[in-house]
Image (cartoon, grey):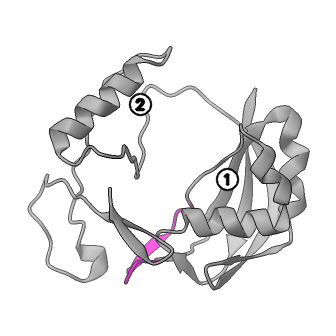
């Protein structure tokens, strides 16, 4: 059985593309996370600040998905400070959350390397979903006014947005 271990966070801001840096920061405190194949680290939510920055809010949490029997692996993070690519955030206390079934699943970021057009991406994502025991239909959700948070001119309603992901200063399209 998998659970999410959720920690509150305190700090001003982190990079919007923080996944790789977050994994590195956690690994520096808990090197054993590299050996846990079932561990998953969720992206941190926050308020887009522009300039590829994400402001932390009271609702910002660090969520780590682990098998129930491995919860003790991540509990030592409570009270620690993480250096996420130069931005320091303080980790609060942990709470354990059971996973709940959902009729609809959404993700703000899905990467399938090599599928750059909307139709190619949707076909590839549907093939991957069809290979799983669960069933469903893949679709893209239009981003409403995606540039407003970045202080730029808004796009047309229902327009899909293709962005880049920055890892170690390299910007890759996704």
Q: Position of residue 172 (x, y in %)?
A: 35, 64
Farthest left residue in view: 156
For image coordinates 44% across by 35% down, the residue present is 105
Can the viewer see residue 79?
yes
Q: Where is residue 100 in the image (x, y as percent from the top left)?
A: 61, 30
- Compared to 158, does 140 lie above or below? above
For image coordinates 57% across by 74% down, the residue present is 56
Mark positioned earlier in the residue sequence (1 or 2): 1
- Frontmost residue, 115 versus 79: 115
Residue 45 falls inside the magenta stretch: yes
Can the viewer see residue 138?
no
Q: Where is residue 61 in the image (x, y as percent from the top left)?
A: 65, 61
Q: Mark 1 points at which residue?
A: 63
Q: Name the residue under label 2.
A: 104
Residue 162's disc is: none
Q: Is residue 21 left or right of residue 129?
A: right
Q: Quadrant of residue 9?
A: bottom right
Q: Quadrant of residue 120?
A: top left
Residue 93 falls inside the magenta stretch: no
Query: In front of the other: label 1 or label 2?
Result: 1
Mark 1 crowdedness (10 Å alpha carbons): few <14, some 14-19, many ≥20: many
Mark 2 crowdedness (10 Å alpha carbons): few <14, some 14-19, many ≥20: few
Task: Give the residues drawn in magenta, as a range.
Answer: 44-53
- Frontmost residue, 108 versus 123: 123
Q: How many numbered marks does the figure carry?
A: 2
């Amino acid at each position: 059985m998998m659970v999410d271990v959720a920690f509150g966070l305190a700090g001003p801001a982190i990079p919007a593309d923080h996944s790789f840096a977050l994994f590195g920061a956690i690994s520096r405190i808990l090197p054993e996370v590299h050996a846990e194949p079932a561990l998953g680290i969720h992206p941190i939510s926050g308020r887009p600040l522009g300039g590829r920055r994400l402001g932390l809010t009271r609702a910002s949490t660090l969520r780590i998905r682990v098998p129930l029997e491995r919860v003790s692996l991540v509990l030592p993070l409570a009270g620690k400070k993480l250096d996420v690519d130069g931005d320091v955030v303080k980790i609060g206390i942990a709470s354990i959350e059971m996973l709940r079934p959902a009729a609809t699943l959404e993700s703000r970021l899905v990467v399938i390397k090599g599928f750059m057009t909307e139709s190619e991406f949707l076909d590839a994502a549907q093939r991957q979903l069809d290979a799983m025991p669960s069933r469903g239909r893949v679709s893209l959700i239009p981003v409403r006014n995606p540039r407003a948070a970045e202080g730029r001119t808004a796009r047309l309603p229902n327009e899909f947005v293709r962005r880049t992901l920055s890892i170690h200063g390299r910007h890759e399209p996704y």
